[in-house]
Amino acid sequence: STMESFLRELPKCEHHVHLEGTLEPELLFKLASRNNVKLPKGYPKTVEELSYRYEHFKDLQDFLDLYYVGMSVLQKEQDFEDLAWEYLNRAHSEGLEHVECFFDPQGHTERGIGMDVVIHGFRNALTRAEKELGISTKLIMCLLKHLPVANSLQTMKDFKPYYQKGWIHGLGLDSTEIGNLPEKFTECYKYGRENYPEGSLYTSHAGEEGGPEYVEQALKYLKVSRIDHGIHSVEDPVIMKTLAERDVLLTVCPLSNKRLQVVDDVSEEPIRELLESGVPFSINSDDPAYFGGYILDNYLAVQNAFNLSVENWITIARNSVRCSVIDDSRKKDLY
Ligand code: HPA
Ligand code: ZN
């Protein structure tokens, strides 16, 4: 249809994609065999079995348990490069022009992988994509909410040199939401503001499975300028007003929410409420290999559910560019 080709050709920015969540079953098994990694007992044995498993997540934790095992096949610099490069190529073929991607350093350092291995691998792919595909890229490090705060604080200190080199551009917070309130990480964000370069982005996952109080805490204690997911904000009009006034971008992930049973159907996403209240949001894939779709599939799922107008899409695309961490000349290129 014309709307589909319009969305395909629309220059897109992605603000919520975990590089470890772009690990397709094919590459996962290829790397397991290349690195002699023995997957645990009970783990799916074939691409088909694993793909089937991805279609039946009970909730966020059920996904996370599989996601952390999956990343154990990532061992060498080349593995991290291959992973990111496959994602960047695929997303570029769907109109991706700018990406601010997450990675989970503790998911690798906790199992003995060197920091340089992870960063150099990802950087090789990102710089290659900038040169060969013309995509602009930023890298955002996420802290894992389920680990002790002391571990996260140490990780922040360990990765400071990469921020100083300009190789990492922001801080985020992901993993298990329920029971891990943002306030717990106040100290980490304070450390970042005092030690990382000025202009670094501060964001946090909040309001995915958790209610609006998680979003409220991320704003209050972590002083984030962006919220990842944040869909449960619509339950609290005061928070909605704050988000609109402060121009806080919500990075919404429709297919992720569906697969993790945060919503029963994409039509339950608060797309109209966000548009009407003037809260900026972007549409993203989160963990595309696990959730059945890359960026364009997420745009199309929203269009199928809401039948938005071209004017609505222009608002979405404009906010997505405006709230990206890129300079004004690049913004002009994209919009
Ligand atoms: N939520 C929390 N943690 C995550 C996610 C998510 O959607 N994806 C990868 N880690
Ligand atoms: Zn996420």
Image (tube, rainbow, N blue to C red):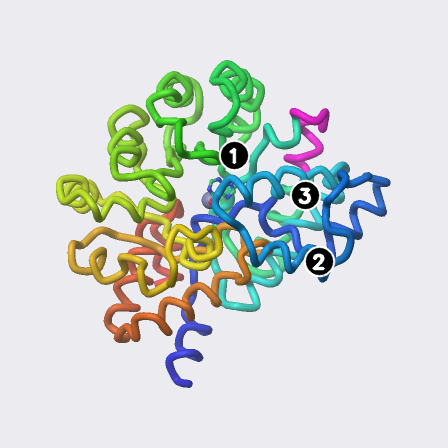
Q: Is residue 172 visible?
A: no
Q: Which residue is mark 1?
A: 168
Q: Which residue is mark 3?
A: 70
Q: Secondary structure at mark 3?
A: helix
Q: Position of residue 17 (x, y in %)?
A: 50, 49
Query: Between 268 and 299, which is closer to the camera in this rendering?
Result: 268
Name the mark nearer the viewer: 3 or 1.
Answer: 3
Residue at the image position 69 percent from the left and 46 percent from the top: 81
Residue at the image position 32 percent from the left and 44 percent from the top: 230
Q: Which quadrant of the rendered structure holds the C terminus? A: bottom left
Local packing at callout 3 (Cα closer than 10 Å; few below 14, some 14-19, many 20+) is many
In this view, 17 is above or below 305: above
Residue placed furthest toward the bottom? 1
Name the mark nearer the viewer: 2 or 1.
Answer: 2
Name the mark nearer the viewer: 3 or 2.
Answer: 2
Q: Position of residue 298 (x, y in %)?
A: 44, 63
